[in-house]
Structure formats: structure tokens, C-alpha cells
Amino acid sequence: MNRRKFIKNTALTGAGLTLGNSLMGCDEKTSEKTKNTIINSENGSKTSLPLVIATWHVKEATAKAMEVLQAGGNVLDAVEQGCMVEEANENGQSVGKGGLPDRDGNVTLDACIMDKNGNCGAVAYLQDITHAVSVARKVMEDTPHVMLAGEGAKQFAISQGFEPEDLLTETSKKEWEEWKVEAKYKPIINIENHDTIGMLAIDKNGDISGACTTSGLAYKMGGRVGDSPIIGSGLFVDNEIGAAVATGLGEEVVKTVGSFLVVELMRQGKSPQEACEEAIGRIVNKPNSNYKDFQVGYIAVNKKGETGSYSIHQWFSMTKFQNGVNEQIQSDFFNKS
Ligand code: ASP
């Protein structure tokens, strides 16, 4: 749908269409600093902005992003600060500090960020810096490039004031040492309770941004980079249409340019849910697909504030913060056999 058609089909105004606390959800109420914007869709349903969604069960992260938006903050700040919550969480073993290392014991991070104007930045194979998403943002804003990798990314981060630190926690080191006994490499479906954190947000004006950050697959080969820093695969934002972000086996996401695909399917008129389902279909319907052995999940949002999520296997979830309600939503999935 092009911009003109979108404007025709939706009413996106602040005028008179606001939600007060009476309609706000129950357990976690938002500040009253900014009022919500109501969008009327063609089918008569209503959604309200701002809105934040993220992969997996990350309520503290979505709460942080919503706090930024409700304070009238920038939507790019919201997704960055939301992702930073999980990067700093040492108990999350798939993101930032405390992430499980590669087979040589090195924690290496991938992240990217994309704004409403289509600007983007990414880091791949970054070591010793907790907030990979913030380095990605610096790449976007302070360099002429889109992606920095490895030692160059680390040196750039240090030059921007990021403090190097050891990201391998005692817990993750112990698990790696136990893994080394057999050193069997096999991508595991749903490593602990979340893998990549991917976050998409829309502010009350309808502007979209997204970010994602991960330590990638546990015990991967040294030098391996997944989908998460690759714009179009791990994340894609098109402010006219919507946005999508991926989690799971990055190789399979890259082979289908997954997040770009989801956004393009929405451009063709599919709902976020239908688009996520078709993008998963592209993976599982390949000849000889061994999808039973790996997980991929997508979440998506369109310009109307409608959301969707879908995965290959059960137990993928999305956290959604909208209308004062911050909730975990179990995703529908393909493999029901
Ligand atoms: N997509 C990430 C990667 O392949 C990992 C994950 O989300 O589990 O690096």
C-alpha cells in the first residue's frame, strides 16, 4: 500500500481521538504525559499508539521503551534503550553481557538498528562491549558506513567512549566448559527463554523504528555472523508500511531475507500475521527443508499498529506493550505434528 492509499484508509490524528486511563490496561499503567493516538482500520477495528513489541518474554525491555515514548521521547531512543535492558542483563545468555560464547570461549555480538528515514547501522562480531545496539546506532549516526565488524567495530566503540569489559560471566564460562567435554555443535530450538531480542516501536505520530541485538548461536564457529546485524534479514523498517524482526537460526533467515520479505508482503496488502506466516512458509516449504531441527520466529507491525508473530515451532512468544498493558503473547506456529 502506498502512502496515499494508507492515508485514505486510516484516520491517524491526535484530534479528539485519545484514550484516557479508563481504557488503559490493568497491571502496568503508562504515564499520562502523552495521550495515545487511535487509528481506525478499514475493517472497523481500532488500534492505539504508541506501541512496542519485542521477541520473547522481555517485559522490562518493552517497559523501558514505552517509558521513553510516553515521556515524549524519540522512537529510535525507545528501541535502543529497550534493547539495552536485555544487553545489560547478565542472566540472559543470548544477548550482551553474559551471552554464551563461541566454541573458542569468545562472546561475540551482532546488532543493528534502523530509523523511520531508512537510515541504519550495524555491528557484527563485536567483542568486549556490552551495548552492541548503541554501537550500531553510532555507526549509523557518526560514520559514512552501515556496518562495522570485529576489531574495527570494537576500536570504533572505544573511540566513542564505550568501556571494554569481559562479557563472559562465570555462569556462561561454566556452561561452555561443560559443552567442551563433548563439543557437539547443534543449533538448539529455543535456547533458554529467549535468543535475539528484536524490538519494534511506533510513536504516537505513527513513526516506526526497530533494533535487534544478540550474542548469536551458542558455541558457533569463531567468526560466524548471523542474521541479526544484516539489514533486511534480521530487521527491516519501512516507515510507510511497517517493520519486522527475526529470531532463531540466522542462516535460514538470511537465505530468505526474512524481515524484508515480511515488510514487502505487508506492502502487498497482507496483515502482519499473514506476512509472518508466509515468510515462515518460505523456509519450511523449501525442498528438503530440515525445519524440524531448527527454530525461526518473526514478529511484525504495520503502520496501522496491527501486529503479528509466527514461528516454526511452539514456545516462541512476543511481548507487546500497548494501551497500558505490557503482556507476553504466545505465538502461533507451523509445526503442529
Ligand atoms: N538469530 C540469531 C543468530 O542466528 C540467534 C537467535 O536469535 O537465536 O545469530
Image (cartoon, helix red, strand yellow):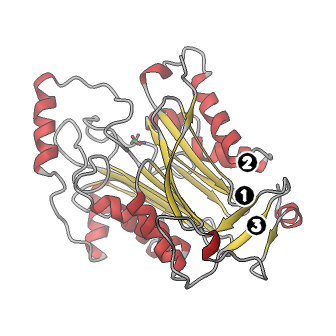
Residue at 51 percent across and 82 percent down: it is 71
Q: Quadrant of residue 333?
A: top right
Residue at 22% over, 43% down:
101
Q: Which residue is mark 1?
A: 241
For the residue with label 3, is its CB less than 8 Å from the closest atom of ligand 1? no
Q: Is residue 3 left or right of residue 60?
A: right
Point out the tag, 3 or 1, that comes first from the N-terminus: 3
Where does residue 313 sit, x and y in percent of width and height? Answer: 49, 29
Does residue 4 appear left or right of residue 278 in this picture?
right
At x 55% / y 21%, what residue is drawn? 336
Res 266 label: 2
Q: Are marks 1 and 2 in contact (CB under 8 Å)?
A: yes
Q: Is residue 129 above or below residue 316?
A: below
Ligand 1 lies in which image quarter?
Answer: top left
**Whether residue 78 is visible:** yes
| Image disc number at residue 39 | 3
- Which is more foreground, mark 3 or mark 1? 3
